Amino acid sequence: MSKNTFEENQRRHRLEDDQRVWLFGYGSLIYLVDFPYLESRPASIRGWSRRFWQGSHDHRGTEENPGRVVTLIEEAGAVCGGLAYLVEAPVFRQLDIREKNGYLRVATEMTFDDGSHAPGLTYIATPDNEAYLGEASEYEIARHIYRAEGPSGTNADYLLDLAAALRELGLHDQHVFDIEFHILKLGNQ
């Protein structure tokens, strides 16, 4: 079941319209940039790992057959790479709609490729949200993804697009690449 977090996100981290904020993208925000931004830079955040543990009832699946999309899981010593976008505060209205299926805005410290740091926001779907699917083996996740499709396309395309974008950025994510391996094998059966 999906939980619409739009209203909650509008109350969190109140932003003034003239404010500029860094947004950290680690999933589809890396390769599906359908929002205006002022600057984009490779970045990472510490203490988090990317995992396909969140359900997607509104984009890559349906209420009856949710897809699986990435969220961040706290993990000591982990570093999650992605892209940071400098956006004007009103852009978060659009992003809050896009990320409404269980994701909440969370403050984070980003590290850019040059070693500099900046505070910003990211979207995380925590285990207590209604759309959370939780941990499973990469093979089970791949089988789930292979069968899911929603208004934004197939769940497999989401996974393959993310894997390609990570490679283009020079980032290695074993979880994502293991699922990709299984998806490609399923596609060749």
Image (tube, rainbow, N blue to C red):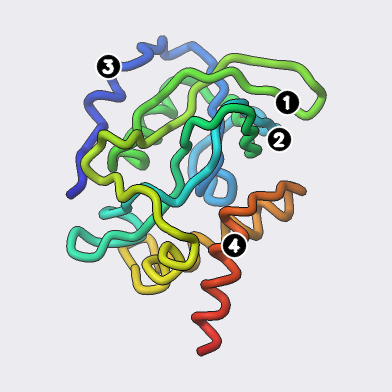
Nearer the N terminus, badge 1 or badge 3? 3
3 or 4: tag closer to the N-terminus? 3
Residue picked out by circle 4: 178
Task: Assess whether mark 1 and mark 4 are in contact (beta carbons under 8 angstroms).
Answer: no
Residue 99: x %, y % from top left: 36, 39
Left or right of 11, for residue 78: right
Between 3 and 185, the residue placed more toward the observer is 185
Occupied quadrant, residue 119:
top right
Q: Earlier in the sequence, mark 4 or mark 2?
A: 2
Tell me if residue 2 comes above or below residue 24 in the rendering.
below
Vertical position of residue 144 compared to residue 25: above or below: below
* Residue at image mark 1: 112
Q: Position of residue 85 (x, y in %)?
A: 60, 30
- 151 over 115 or under it: above or below: below
Amino acid type, label 2? Pro
From the image, tell me which residue sits under label 3: 11
